[in-house]
Image (cartoon, rainbow, N blue to C red):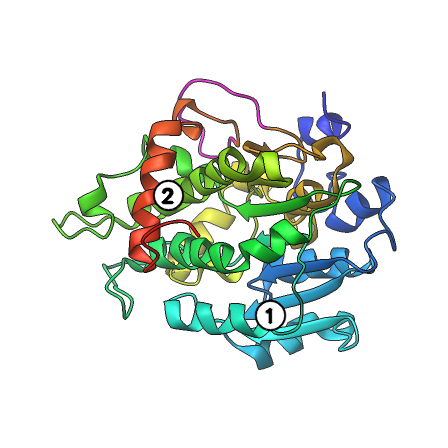
Amino acid sequence: MSRYSAAHANPQGPTDARPTAMQIIQDEQMQGKLVGKVVVITGVSSGLGVETARALAATGATLYMTARDLDKAKTALGDIFDPSQMDLVHMDHTSLESVRTAAQSILSKTDKITILICNAGVMAVKDLQLTVEGYELQFATNHLAHFLFFELLKPALLAGSSSEFQSRVVIVSSSGHRTIRGLGPSDNYHYQKGGYDPREAYSQSKTANVYMANEIERRYGSQGLHATSLHPGVIATPLGRHMSPEEIEALLTNPIVQMFQKSPEQGAATTVWGTVSKELEGKGGLFLDNCAVAERGDYDENPLSGNAVPHTYCPQDEARLWKDSLEMVGLSSED
């Protein structure tokens, strides 16, 4: 049982006793313990990315952070942005060329990375939108950009692993991956055959996040590079910017949602737990929820549950997605 189980047993909204990202750092006694290590975080212009950066800055690690709007990110990071400890890099997740440029910028400054946090995301895009490469926007932003970023940073992640702290990739997914039962067929990731649905497309992209983490563990865990994915919880952040004001109001005034809702500081806690938890040292291929490894169960109708479902772990589809993703980002095979 997780040390945080009791705190999550009876949620009472964003001001309750559920842990914050900074509490995780304190509980794991990680203040100043990652000096000399490099952490890369995507999507730090708002929400969970900011609170993740705030907590990890306390570890003393050097932070390389990406954002589409650097001025917005600097404002959001506010008093925690220390140019001597942090570096902001432009990255537009809707452009694979931008991802390549961002990776090159980071690798020009360091050849060892110990932690990669894939946090940036988008949801509820109303109509079918394609990136410049022709890929569905949610799938491209949430999965393909992070997949390519990982592939480019992989040599540094392998080099940054050590016996006392093995490298970690932490991918922010969602309980939304439970909505559809797995991935669509390889020839219809981008709704080439029609039938686009915003919720289904988001679910597919979040399933891809889970499968990427599981497959990283399968391929690189024995080399000291581990990966987990997670559900952060229900948090009011700009992730919902494609939703209408009426939809957002209906969601946030729902009494059940209000009870389960977390603050951004609480929402970043599971990400940070996956990043620094001693319990997870040398482990991966796990789906996390509420600062613990998610329980496995059957399908249910609770949209707020972070439990794993049967298709959360699917080696056949994980391998298929990996192969297809390599081709989509222009990498015909592994290095």
Callout 2: helix, strand or loop? helix
Mark 1 / mark 2, whichever is N-terminal: 1
Chief secondary structure of the magenta span? loop
Residue 199's x, y, as percent?
A: 32, 46
With 277 as the anchor, is 28 left or right in this view?
right
Disc 1 residue type (three-letter): Ile
Counting other residues with Cα less than 10 Å from the Cα at mark 2, is it few (<14), some (14-19), or many (20 or more)? some
Which residue shows up at 40% across the image and 21% down it? 299
Give the extent of the magenta segment.
294-305
Which residue shows up at 37% across the image and 43% down it? 322
Q: Tell me the distance, in whole angstroms, between the alpha carbons under discs 1 and 2.
A: 24 Å
Callout 1: helix, strand or loop? helix
Give residue 164's quadrant in the image.
Answer: top right
Which residue shows up at 59% across the image and 44% down it? 261
Which quarter of the image is occupied by the N terminus?
Answer: top right
Counting other residues with Cα less than 10 Å from the Cα at mark 1, is it few (<14), some (14-19), or many (20 or more)? some
Looking at the picture, tell me which residue is in the foreground, 74 or 216.
216
Give the residue at the far left of this rendering: 193
Q: Is residue 297 magenta?
A: yes
Can I make out residue 198 in this image? Answer: yes
Disc 2 residue type (three-letter): Trp
Residue 326's x, y, as percent?
A: 35, 51
Where residue 106 is drawn, which disc sits there? 1
With 110 as the anchor, is 141 left or right in this view?
left
Looking at the picture, tell me which residue is in the foreground, 49 or 197.
49
Q: Which residue is mark 2?
A: 322
**182 vs 141: above or below:** above
